Amino acid sequence: MRRTIGEIGGNPYDRASVSFRVLPTPAALLATVALRVGSVAVASLLAILSARVAEASPFPSPSPEPSFAPSVEVLVDRPIAVRDAPILVPVRIAGAAPATVSVRAIAGDGSALGFEAQILWPRRPRVGEVEPLRWARASNELRLSRERQAGATDAYLALDPPRELPRVERFELGAVRIAPRWFEAANLDALDGLLARLARRASAFTPVGAPDAGLSLPDPAAPFERFRWEIGRALRGWAAPPAFEAGSPDDLAARATTALWLAALSRLASTSEGVAVECAEMLVATCRDDTAPAPIAAWIADPAALSSMLALALDASRTGETLVEAMLSWLRVRSSIQIWVEDETRDEVVLALANPTTSEEVVRLSWLDSVWLDVDDPPLAALAMPGEVTRVRVPRPRRAEIDGARIPQDDGRATLRIEHRGEVRMLVVTPPVVRAGLAGVVLSRFVAPLDLVSVSMGTSADAPTELAAVASLRPRLGSWEVFAEVRTGRAPTADDAIVLVGAGGTAITVRGNGAVDDPAGLVSADPNASGTLEFRAYADRFRVGFVLPPAWIDRIEGDAVVMLGLRRTGPEGVADAPFAAVPWRATPRLLGVDLLGGGARVGETLYSAP
C-alpha cells in the first residue's frame, strides 16, 4: 500500500510516496541491525524489544512490495511493550525520511484512534556530553534525535498512543500491523513499597559516604540509564536527575526503558519479593573503596548481561515459580565481581576486586602459560569482602629454567585465569619489564581511563583524538632521552599538559605554555646544564625532551630498569600511556623498560598494552 507523504506526516516532499512493509526478524537480522547502528548497547535494546520475534504473528503480514520511493521497513512486528508507556520499534528507512508517520491505534473492542509517531535516530554522545572522568558510564550511551545522521538507515518508530484510547491491542501503518507482547505497567505504589523494604534490608551494606556524580551515580544525560535512577531513588535516596523535555526523543527513550525494568521487577515481586530485591540491588549496587573519594558504582553494566536479565524477567513462557527459579539460577551462576589490574611490579600483580554483594566471595586465580608454570605454584584463592573493593597481590609465576637459564617466552606476557561462581575470565598480564630496542621504546597509544563498562567487558578505549600524544625513551649522545609530542589540534595553552612519572612516583609536568612543575628537581631550566629540559611549541602541538634522570634508573640483577608512565591532560579530559587506570588514581601506572636489554635488539620497540 502506498500513501503520500502529506498523508503520513507533513513532510515537505510533496507528491512523494512512502511504502510500509514488515520484514521477518530472526536473531541474525537483529544482530545485523545493531551493528549497523554501531553500538553493542543497541544490540541489548533490540534484543529486549524483540524477544521471541521469530514466532508467527497473529496477523498476516503483507508481501513486501517493490518500492522506488522512500520506504519504512518495520523490523520487529511483535515488540515487548508495557501499557501506557512508549514503545520503540526498530525500523529501516531507505531514501528520504519523514519526520513522523501516521499510525492507527486499535483497541480490543475494535475502536481506533490515529496519531503521529515520530521517527527517532540514534546517535553517539558528542564531545563534552559525557564527563571525561566518569566511572559510572552508561551501559547504553546512545541518545535519540529527530535529526538523521549522514548515511543512517536504522531508526526507531516511537509509538506513544494518546491516552484517550485505553487498552490498545495493536497498531497499523498502512497495511503493516504491529502487535506488541503486552505487559501490565508496574504498580508504582506497590513498587515503592518493595524498594523501601529493600532499602531497609540492605542498609547495613550500603557504602558510607555521600555519592559522587561521576563515581557513584548513573549518567543523568543518558536516557537508557533512567531506570537506575528510579530504583536508586528509593533504594539509595538518590535525588531525581533533571527531567528530559516532555515528549522529546530522550524522554520517550527514558520512559520506554524504565517501564520495561519496573514491569520486570514487579513481575518478579508478585511471586518472590526476595528475588526482586536481589535483582534491584544488582542494578544500583555500589562499593566502598578506600582509595576513592566516594563509593563507586559496581552494578551490572555489561549490555549483554543487562539484556539477558531483562529478557528473562519478561519471558512470557515462564511464570510464577518457574520464572523465579530461572532468575535465581541466572543470578547464582553469574559473577557479580568487577576486576581490574591496579598495579604491577617485577614480582607481583595487584588486582582490585569490587564485590557489590552482601556476602564474602571466593575468587580462584591460576596462571595458564605452561612455560611460566612451576610444579610448586598452586592455584591461589582470594576472598572478596562484601560491599567493598579488596586488593589482592598475586605473585608472578616463576619462569621455568634449564640448568639455571630462563626459558624465554615471546613478549613475556602471561595469562591469569580468574574463576568466580560459574564464570571464567582470562586476564592478559604485561611482562614485568620490556626490553628497549636499539632505537628505544615508543609509546604511541594513549588510552582513556577505566570505567565500569570497560571493566565489565574487559576492554579498553583509545583516547579521543583531542588528547593525542606520542612519547619515547630513546638513546641520545651516549645517554637516554625522554621525549614527548603532545598534539592539541590548536594553539597549545596552559590547560594542555603532559605528566611524566618515574621511579618512586616522582613527576615532571610540562604545560602547553612552557611552564614546568618539577618538585623533585629532576631537570634543569638552565640551557647550559646537562639535564636541561627542552620545550618547543607549534601551531597545533608542543614537544618536550630531557635527559633521563639518574634517579629514575633502577639497577637490579645486572639490568638498568626505568619505570615510566605518562598522563596527557587537557580541556577534553585525561589519557594515560601505556596502561589505563581508574579515574580517581592520582598518577598513571608505570611500565618497566630495560635499557640494557640483554641479547640482540633490532630497531625500536613499539609498545602497546594489551
Image (cartoon, rainbow, N blue to C red):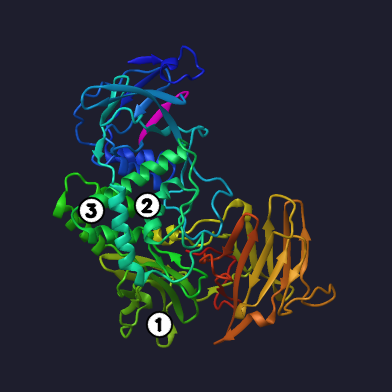
Q: Which mark is residue 92?
A: none
Q: Position of residue 338 (x, y in %)?
A: 38, 66
Q: Quadrant of residue 362?
A: bottom left
What residue did someone put label 1 on? Answer: 398
Between marks 2 and 3 in the image, the one whose residue lies nearer the viewer: 3
In the image, what residue occupies the spot 41% across and 53% down?
Answer: 229
Image location of residue 466, percent across then percent down: 63, 52
Q: Secondary structure at mark 2?
A: helix
Say left or right for 542 vs 221.
right
Position of 1 relative to 464 (above/below) = above
> In the rendered structure, which segment of residues is drawn in magenta?
88-97
Circle 2 sits on which residue?
Answer: 303
CA gap, disc 2 and disc 3:
21 Å
Image coords of residue 490 (percent x, y) = 72, 50
Dots 1, 2 in contact, CB < 8 A: no
Tag 2 or tag 1, which sits nearer the N-term?
2
Residue at image position (78%, 73%) is 532
- The answer to which quarter of the image holds residue 557 is bottom right
For the residue pair 3 and 377, the one nearer the viewer reads as 3
Which residue type carries mark 3? Leu
Question: Does residue 431 appear in this view?
Answer: no
**Amino acid type of the residue tagged 1 in the rendering:** Arg
Label 3 sits on residue? 268
Q: Residue furthest right?
A: 528
**In the image, 557: left or right of 318?**
right
**Mark 1 crowdedness (10 Å alpha carbons): few <14, some 14-19, many ≥20:** some
Q: Is residue 92 magenta?
A: yes
In the image, 132 versus 105, the foreground residue is 105
Residue 21 located left or right of residue 501: left
